Amino acid sequence: MRSGALRKSIVFIVLGILGVGGAIALNIGWVIFSWREAGLLIAGLILFPLIITGVVLNTIFLVREIRRNEQHENFINAVTHELKTPIASVKLHLQTLQQRPVDEPKRQEFYQVMVDDCDRLLSTVEQVLRAGRLRNGQTKGGFRPIDLGRVMDECLALAQTRYRLTPGELTYNATFPAERPPRVLGDEDDLKAVVLNLIDNAIKYSGNSVTVAVELTQSGTRAATIRVSDRGLGIPVAELSQIFKRFYRIPGAMTSRIKGAGLGLFIVRAVVARHGGTVFAESDGEGLGTTFTVQLPLTTVTS
């Protein structure tokens, strides 16, 4: 699919270049052979840049449409896989329990696998629904003061359980006054989605050795900063400005094997922007890890 779209892009680019070249050749030839016709010459000089602009804009539009369609197709394929795989797994385990006797330890193992698959299925559905809701640009109505420290604790505990991490694989450091924990005005579920998506990304892209560090710091009374760092695959510098786009996934053999629908970082950026904050990624390149930094404005409202 990707190679077909690339070929189409090349075809349209070549056609655009040929169109521009043909227009230039015709215009030059027409000027040479019709230089005595001053009126036509002026008209040609006016129409020429318009024709060139039209050809260039048309080529750009076609290339963008091809890339957008390619992203949509990749998203549909990824989501279909993310939905189909856990459903097939649950069905297989249920059929096994239905068709033959299973001892109690194995039965409990099957139950746990099915629960994990249902959680994965629910997570995918929630990601798609949240991305759609955020893209519609909902207002800040319903925001309330949220204890960011508590949100971090809950997300870390969930990630620890979900990925069955061993001690040291996921570390957490919080630096803020004990008597004044960082509070932000926002939506608790959306803020949890930000933290969980960043931790989920860091773990998935860590490779075989997971080393993820999470920090929460408070600078004065104005902002709270969340950092999630890993020592994994890293991000090419050229891709840092692209990764927060909807459906976007970094091309490459290593990243293509990692499951995902290309919505996690889009959700992160949309939620952070909705809360009046900023988010950015830093990486020294492939294989050198990545750090995501989220800054959120604090609130003085207590209830």
Image (spheres, rainbow, N blue to C red):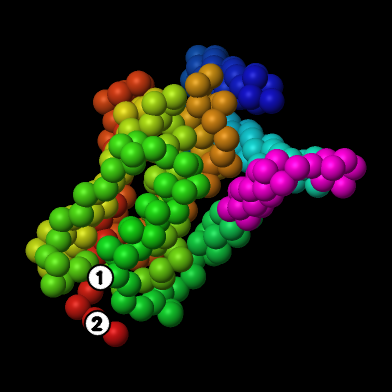
Quick check: marks 2 and 1 in contact, CB under 8 Å? yes
Write the residue at 87% across / 41% down: 100
Is residue 294 depicted above or below 33 in this figure? below
Given residues 155 and 18, the one toward you in this image is 155
Is residue 24 depicted above or below 148 in this figure? above
Given residues 131 and 114, the one toward you in this image is 114
Element under label 1?
A: strand
Element under label 2?
A: loop
In the rendered image, the residue lying farthest to the bottom is 303
Give me the C-alpha separation between circle 2 and circle 1. 8 Å
Asked if residue 116 is among those painted magenta in the image, a careful observer would answer: yes
* Type of the residue with mark 1: Arg
Write the residue at 29% across / 85% down: 303
The quarter holding residue 85 reads top right
Question: In this orientation, does residue 262 appear?
Answer: yes
Given residues 171 and 49, the one toward you in this image is 171
Q: Main secondary structure of the magenta part?
A: helix
Which percent across, then down, holds residue 202? 39, 38
Which percent across, then down, holds residue 298? 22, 69
Is residue 171 depicted above or below 139 in this figure? above
Which percent across, then down, holds residue 153? 33, 59
Task: Tell me the residue that label 1 is attached to.
Answer: 183
Given residues 147 and 106, the one toward you in this image is 106
In the rendered image, the residue lying farthest to the left is 220
Which of the numbered marks, if any, corresponds to residue 291? Answer: none
Give the magenta range: 96-124
Task: Tell me the residue that label 2 is attached to.
Answer: 302
Which percent across, then down, holds residue 152? 33, 58
Q: For the N terminus, which image quadrant?
A: top right
Write the residue at 15% across / 56% down: 175
Is residue 155 depicted above or below 81 in this figure? below
